[in-house]
Image (tube, rainbow, N blue to C red):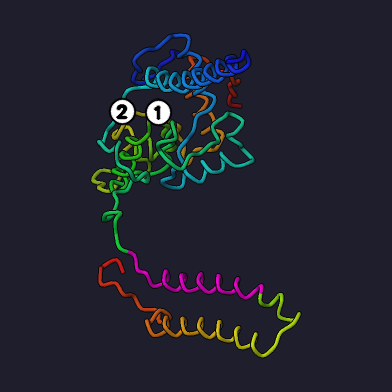
Amino acid sequence: MSDTVVWSSIYVLAFLVGGLTIGVASMVLAWLLAPKRTRMVYQKTLRSIECGVAPIGPARIRFGVVYYLYALIFVAFSVDVLFLFPVALVYNEKSGWLDFAEVLLFVGILALVIVYAWKKGIFSWKSKLKSPQA
Amino acid sequence: MEKQVEVPPGLIHFAMLDDVLNMARANSLWPMTFGLACCAIEMMATGASRFDMARFGCEVFRPSPRQSDLMIVCGTISKKMAPAVMTLYDQMPEPKWVLAMGNCAISGGPFKFPGQYGIVEGVDQLFPVDVYVPGCPPRPEALIEGILKLEEKLRGKRCFPTVEAQ
């Protein structure tokens, strides 16, 4: 091994040890110096909500998906529009009835997706949830 | 004024380091964003540009008790609100200080009468208080003076001049 490689390795090792020392030392210092407890009058130090008021119900509740489905359809169609941009770019160059038919086919199949979502009742704003949080 | 800091100690502590830490604490108190009644309006005025608490290093109002070390109890503590106030006090980590602002927080103020059933008669009935600032409501200058008194309590001496009444 050449001298350079050895010295570089030593540098890397030194920086590694130094970094670890600083990281661990700050934790140990905080552990040594920090007050070990806090004065309590109501035994609520460990309550996770920090507004003082008792939480109502658990955090793991079910949300209505009504808007979620609507938004999903929107995302799907905005990505489809991305596919139409290159078409719009080259359409004026040279195009015939065949190209028109292809684009029409593509958009037509997309339109079927709208019909499908429509049939599924996504566009009617009705909660599909039967729980009290709905 | 005697220096009196009731901080539960860590595993080790050094007198000199404590002095330095207390100087830092006294000059960068982080109050909690927490108002109970009309005194809170005066507290907001104290934080705003005309009176400017930032000159004394304690303008960083924290939205969480876990980040703050000064609780300014500004307003009437109704019995319904008392559990919330006590919870917030519990959730503040050490070192923590409490400043009772206004007559309601000190003793119940104008709402204290024989047979009253709605309010807690002074925040010191709930937990220890470090500084009392009287007034109904106290002016922002009074709150600043209270905070300087707290600084005096932390450091054992006062950096800012005292204003004499005229």
Amino acid beneath label 2 = Arg
Amino acid beneath label 1 = Lys
Displayed quadrant of residue A62 = bottom left
The stretch drawn in magenta includes residue B97: no
Q: Is residue B42 left or right of residue A103?
A: left
Q: Which residue has dot 2 on it?
A: A39
Mark pair 2, 1: CA separation = 9 Å
B5 vs B134: above or below: above
Disc count in the image? 2
Contact, mark 2 vs mark 1 (Cβ under 8 Å): yes
What is the number of the mark on residue B96? 1
In the structure shown, which secondary structural element does the residue marked by tag 1 occupy? Answer: loop
How far from the left and from the top, in percent, is residue B123?
A: 34, 36
| Residue at the bottom extreme, as displayed | A97
**Residue drawn at 57 percent across, 29 percent down:** B57
How far from the left and from the top, in percent, is residue A3?
A: 62, 13
Magenta range is A63-86
